[in-house]
Image: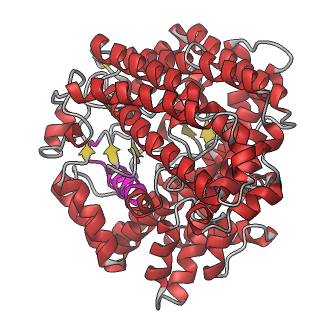
Amino acid sequence: MTSRSSALRKSSARRKSAPAKSKAATKAGKLPEWNLADLYSGIDAPEVTRDLAKMDADCVAFETDYKGKLAEFTARDDGGSWLAGAVKRYEAIDDLAGRLGSYAGLVHAGDSVDPAISKFYGDVSERLTAASTHLLFFGLELNRVDDDVIERAMQTPELGHYRPWIEDLRKDKPYQLEDRVEQLFHEKAQSGYAAWNRLFDQTISALRFKVGGKELAIEPTLNFMQDRAGEKRKAAANALAKTFKENERTFALITNTLAKDKEISDRWRGFKDVADSRHLNNRVEREVVDALVASVRAAYPKLSHRYYRLKAGWFKRKKLPHWDRNAPLPFAATGTIDWPEAQKMVLTAYRGFSPRMADIAERFFTDRWIDAPVRPGKAPGAFSHPTTPSAHPYVLMNYQGKPRDVMTLAHELGHGVHQVLAARNGALMAPTPLTLAETASVFGEMLTFKKLLSQTKSPKQRQALLAGKVEDMINTVVRQIAFYTFERAVHTERKNGELTAQRLGEIWLSVQGESLGPAIEIKAGYENFWMYIPHFIHSPFYVYAYAFGDCLVNSLYAVYEHASEGFAERYLDMLAAGGTKHYSELLRPFGLDAKDPRFWDGGLSVIAGMIDELETMG
């Protein structure tokens, strides 16, 4: 059973590295590339070889010293101290694994098509999986120790420090399998879902899309969907549709295989619902997620449907084709936001909230923890990778100077600040459940948006800022819940057999039509746009965390606006808690309760209120 807090059990850390310039990058000024030497100096560095060997030896020694002894030794008078020593050793191994796995993943994200990097990434992943097989027994044995014995041992302060991790681990107990089966699942992951994840990454990075006579990778092609020129947006959408169509069998096979793999695992472990394993991993109750989903879907008409009707009107149309969904508004400011200006915008907003928060975020720029340019072979999108507590996070972006890119920078730096603050809890308790993992990122966006809004004097600029924020929130809340609905339908139907690419497209169009509403006209070719969403592949059912985080932040920000005294300190304390507390406990100081049915409606009403204001502007 995988514990959310163990890097060893998630050794396929996300990907990154490598130079090359792009036209968009030069338009936005000189863009930073990260310095991964804080982890390792290169894929051939002797330290990598040394640490892999140390990893192997430490794992074997740990198994030799502790396997088969946990129940007996924990029950002794000094059982708490003895077990605390074991957990500390386990955590040190976990930290080393996190360093190795993170480095391999980050280098790979920087260039996932370079054969040497791909081999390095695959080899390190295999070594980590093989080494950590020797540690599998630890969580399994620990969960078989009687509750009263564990409770008595945790009265010892050294072990009591790890109480949150131990209690989290024991929540997995009902879904744990016999040791040999757990080992088989663990070892087969490399040739199973991890291999299909790699295939997806390499395939999506290698795809080329013909736009205006040029062969482009996916990031610059998607970027054209936000171009001012309508013919370029249409050309990009058609290029995406054409290439996706040519590759639909590969993506359908990847999707079917991973859905089946998950169904086998869920069935063996005894999960009842297709998303229950994700809910357990997030430490959130199914009914809370169901309430969120129901609230958002019920709000589609007053959110996305209403906004897109407004947007179509701004373009003097009754309906917009799907490729104009994120089109720049006719009254929005033109031009590219260069990198220094983007940095200043975000850090100024952060500093206005908390100087400490801004100081942490500034290190990402000064210490080269950010990789911003668009490059061939680089992973699309953006993320902040926590690496491991003994190091620091790294942020990947594909910065092209759009206002939305500035919000993405604010978003990822929010993650980064969260990860830096939580690192003090150590490798086992620093990671945050996904339900709160998006809180800091979305809050960072909100701070930046509110700062820009407060500085805006022009009514048209205010309208553009408000509309841009509403679009971002719709993409974060409505779109992600539509994604979640799509995943639920796919995984549920997969139980009865494979789904053709055509059937996957039908499900996609159904959920998109419901969420986007009548003012968005879905044209031919859009049926295959499910193919490039990486979360479906890497983290099934992850997507609801974005909506959870957005609605939560709306409520959190309302508390801040009404009672800002001491709020920043409480907020940073919440982030610094990492994975040591349940989300409900972390929200209590703010008077928020996600189990209250009205909670989600409150968050959604913030978006509706912004649309109300836009309607009055004409």
Q: Position of residue 611 (x, y in %)?
A: 57, 66
Image position of 164 with respect to 120: above or below: below
Picture quadrant of residue 359: bottom left
Residue 166 vs residue 342: left or right?
Answer: right
Q: Position of residue 597 (x, y in %)?
A: 81, 68
Using the rendered image of the protein, determine whether residue 400 is visible from the camera's viewpoint: yes
Q: Position of residue 169 (x, y in %)?
A: 69, 48
How many numbered discs, if any?
A: 0
Residue drawn 33% across the image and 18% down it? 120
* Colour scheme in use: secondary structure
Q: What segment carries the magenta color?
A: 399-416
Residue drawn 46% across the image and 88% down it? 566
Image position of 558 with respect to 536: above or below: below
Quadrant that contains the N terminus: top right
Instruction: Let me know if residue 28 is in the magenta part.
Output: no
Is the magenta region chiefly helix, strand or loop? helix
